[in-house]
Image (cartoon, helix red, strand yellow):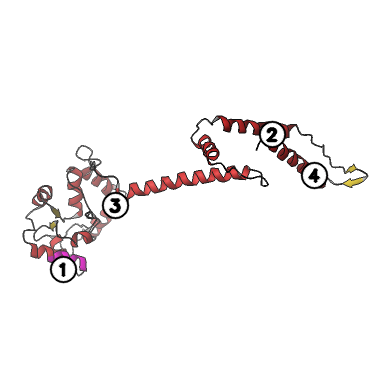
Amino acid sequence: METPIEGAEDLSKQTKIRYGTLAKGSTMTFFNESKIETYERMWKAMSDGGGTFVQNSREGIQRVKSEVYAYLMESSMLEYAVERDCELTQVGGLLDQKGYGVGLPKGSPNRAAISRAILYLQETTVLTELKNKWWKDASHSCGNHIRNPDDDGGPVAGLALCLLSGLVFSTTLSILQYMISLWPRDEKPIQSVPTLSALLSVAILGIKAPQEIRRKIGRLDQVESVVERAPSREMSNEKLFQNGESLDRSSTLRKDRERRRTLTLTDMRSLGF
């Protein structure tokens, strides 16, 4: 499996794809004078390769479309070409940072005024609007590039699949923990795998529960009905008296809860749980 070219570093470490620049242009000068190891290696490959330099950008673009060739050019020209030719694509980031300026004679009195005007156009986003107009004009722009049908999305698709799998697993685990927390602590939890699977199917997928599960759920409803009908003592702020002994409110509430819990567990055992 071949590793895709993602930038200058990948391009410099392979020999299958030839690459070059405009002859005697600023990009060629950049590689010739660079002291960075990657760019030095690329310059040596271009210098020794023969036929890697082109006379104009049109020739370089044509070689990209007809040969196994990568053309290194100024970023502004590259963006303009990619926006209008859907067979082209830009790979990697910028090799270096360069700016454009307005050339004036040395000592020109207009230098300060022109500099202020350029800064004003930049701060008011006029320059950005002009670039979008002439570089990304909808009547000439390719829009979204057509993807290769064999492209499965690469690492992005794999990441999305991992996230989706984790979401499903965590949701299922949360439902299991919730169901177990509802089960009485002194009773054995559900140990039947088919029963547990059926309950999960009902909770997650909305599948109709099997008849046996519905019978058990019905018996649980009966237990809830019995608990609701269980007598409850009316409580007040005054102390209650039973067998001549004084019981405060908290003690009576605790005993009442224990009695109701005993009734619930007894009824569940009688219903077959």
Q: How busy is the neighbourhood of tag 3: few (under 14 within 10 Å), some, or many (20 plus)? A: few
Of the two numbered discs 2 and 3 on the same chain, state the one appearing first in sequence.
Answer: 3
Q: In the drawing, what numbered circle is on residue 255?
A: 4
Q: Name the kind of residue labelled 3 in the image.
A: Gln
Q: Is residue 116 magenta?
A: no
x and y percentages locating residue 190 in the rendered image: 59, 42
In the image, taking residue 29 as reference, residue 223 lies left or right, namely right
* 203 shown above or below 244: above
- Residue of label 1: 33
Q: As shown in the figure, which amino acid type bears the numbered disc 2? A: Val
Q: Earlier in the sequence, mark 2 or mark 4?
A: 2
Question: Residue at image x 33%, y 46%?
Answer: 157
Q: Nearer the viewer, residue 37 or 166?
A: 166
In magenta, the rendered stretch is: 36-44
By secondary structure, the bulk of the magenta-drawn segment is best described as helix
For marks 1 and 3, give the one nearer the viewer: 1
Residue 134 position within the rendered picture, expressed as x and y whole percent measured from the top left:
21, 44
- Tell me the amino acid under the disc marked 4: Lys
Q: Which residue is mark 2?
A: 223
User: Contact, CB < 8 Å: mark 4 with mark 1?
Assistant: no
Q: Earlier in the sequence, mark 4 or mark 1?
A: 1
Q: Earlier in the sequence, mark 1 or mark 2?
A: 1
Distance from Cα at disc 1 to Cα at disc 3: 31 Å
The answer to whether residue 251 is above or below residue 21 is above
